Amino acid sequence: MQFGYTIVYVRDVNASLSFFEQAFGLQRGFVSEGGEFGTLATGATALSFCRHDVARDSVGHDYVAAEDSARPLGMEVGLVTADVPAACERAVAAGATLLNPPQTKPWGQTVAYVRCPDGTLVELCTPMA
């Protein structure tokens, strides 16, 4: 078994892609013609977004949409950066909500948490030693 990708279910794929481009400096990969699915160029493992109607059809059940939940869902997308405070400021300037400011953990890693306009919880962190 190998981890292949993460797909975040969102209301507006293009809005989420645009936010991730502006907030985190990532670039778009593939975007379907109808805008119901899109990816970011994130390296070997893809970070993708899929519109709710398509996702619900694929899953075959309803689910909690992150943007409709008052609290973040119990999962995160982790983005690694050398400068967590600067990444945090950029994300907030782009429209993210700061949930937990940068802090250095006992193991030496600096981490911060933001919530994107589409409800996605993102951890910004330095690389592990």
Image (cartoon, helix red, strand yellow):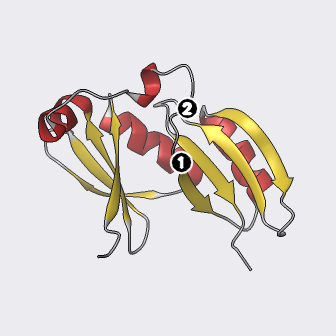
Does residue 38 appear to the left or right of 93 in the view shown? left
Q: Tell whether 24 sits left or right of 97.
A: left
| Residue 100 location, quadrant | top right
Q: Nearer the viewer, residue 39 or 9?
A: 9
- State the image coordinates of residue 111 (x, y, percent, origin top left): 75, 55
Looking at the rendering, which quadrant does residue 34 occupy? top left
Task: For the C terminus, give its image quadrant.
Answer: bottom right
Q: Residue at x 58, y 59 (%)?
A: 79
Residue name at image x 60 percent, y 31 percent: 95
For the residues labelled 2 and 1, say whether their Cβ atoms are less than 8 Å apart. Answer: yes
Residue lying at the far bottom in this picture: please name it. 129
Q: Report which residue position mark 2 lands on.
A: 72
| Viewer-closest of 105 and 112 | 105
Answer with the quarter of the image where residue 9 lies: top left
Q: CA distance from mark 2 to mark 1?
A: 9 Å
Q: Residue at x 71, y 34 (%)?
A: 99
Percent coordinates x, y for residue 11 in the rendering:
32, 28
Other-residue count near label 1 (Cα within 10 Å), few / some / many at <14 / 14–19 / ≥20:
some
Q: Secondary structure at mark 1?
A: loop
Q: Give the residue type that dot 1 points to.
A: Glu
Residue 3 is situated, as x and y percent measured from the top left of the image, at 35, 69
Point out the image quarter for the N terminus.
bottom left
Please, what is the three-letter code of the amino acid marked with disc 2? Pro
* Label 2, residues with CA under 10 Å away: few <14, some 14-19, many ≥20: some
Q: Which mark is residue 89?
A: none
- Give the vertical position of 63 relative to 82 (above or below): above
Residue 116 falls left or right of residue 1: right
Judging by the rendered image, the residue that carries numbered circle 1 is 76
Task: Indicate the secondary structure of the residue bearing disc 2.
Answer: loop
> What residue do we see at 76% from left, 53% from top?
86
Counting from the top left corner in percent of width and height, residue 107 is at: 82, 69
Q: Is residue 71 above or below residue 74?
A: above
